[in-house]
Amino acid sequence: MTPVPLASGSRVLDLGSGAGTYVRLLSSHGHRAVGVDYSIPSLKRSIEADPERLGRYLCGDAYSLPFRDESFELLVMIGIFQALGEPARALTEARRVLRPGGHLVLEILNANEILIRARTLLERTRHENAGVRTFGRSQMTRWIRAAGLRPLRHVPVFLPPRNLPGLEPWMDHPVPRFFLRTVPGCADLGAPSFLLLARRDGEAGQ
């Protein structure tokens, strides 16, 4: 993925910050990082893991962020979309707090990946509710555009399912890795998740 142009001291928001790993990492690189999570226990763990108070941690949710318009140069959303009931609404709120020229990095679980498709089919056969939400890359790209953001890049993430760790050596082998990353359609069928990069265009105040 093309590196996000981010000057030192930029304001960064990690939405769904969990234990604060990305907040601490971004803060250690000289950015003013803020972590937001709706889970009080997660926020407590974040603070305990950050004794030097490198970052800030706030309680909030993705639909009504406690920040003014155009507050951040970068917004990170990793491991959050699978738990959101209204992802399009969250993207609109993300655009609101991004400054013009600011970037959004988000992760989605890939609904078209073979094992995820098989699991979804099994859940439907058993009339079970899906444990987490998955998304097609093209569907998410449409939502990103509808929110007023410009999609820039997508990168497949090839990691084995947690219950099949033995697949990791195979997925990391040069031959399958080459086919998964270069043959059209293989990424959509073989990548459990995608990272997507988007940008808010326009002038300040728009």
Image (cartoon, rainbow, N blue to C red):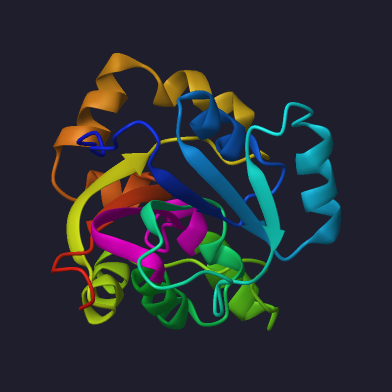
Q: Position of residue 205 (x, y in %)?
A: 23, 76
In this image, 134 relative to 3: left or right?
Answer: right
Up/down of 12 relative to 61, above or below: above
Identify the residue at horizontal 52%, vertical 69% (top origin): 67
Q: Position of residue 127 (x, y in %)?
A: 68, 83
Residue 111 lies in the magenta stretch: yes
Identify the residue at horizontal 79%, vertical 40% (top origin): 47
Residue 161 lies in the magenta stretch: no
Q: Position of residue 85 (x, y in %)?
A: 57, 80
Q: Position of residue 63 (x, y in %)?
A: 54, 79
In this image, 176 relative to 82: left or right?
Answer: left
Instruction: Report the quarter where the C terminus lies.
Output: bottom left
Up/down of 151 relative to 25, above or below: below
Identify the residue at horizontal 73%, vertical 26% (top origin): 52
Instruction: Report the quarter where the N terminus lies.
Output: top left
191 or 27, which lies in front?
27
- Which image quadrant is residue 176 in? top left
Span of residues in magenta:
97-117
Identify the residue at horizontal 15%, vertical 35% (top origin): 182
Up/down of 121 relative to 191, above or below: below
51 or 90, which lies in front?
51
In this image, 28 relative to 38: left or right?
Answer: left
In this image, 122 relative to 139: left or right?
Answer: right
Residue 192 visible in the shown view: no
153 or 46, which lies in front?
46
Residue 149 visible in the shown view: yes
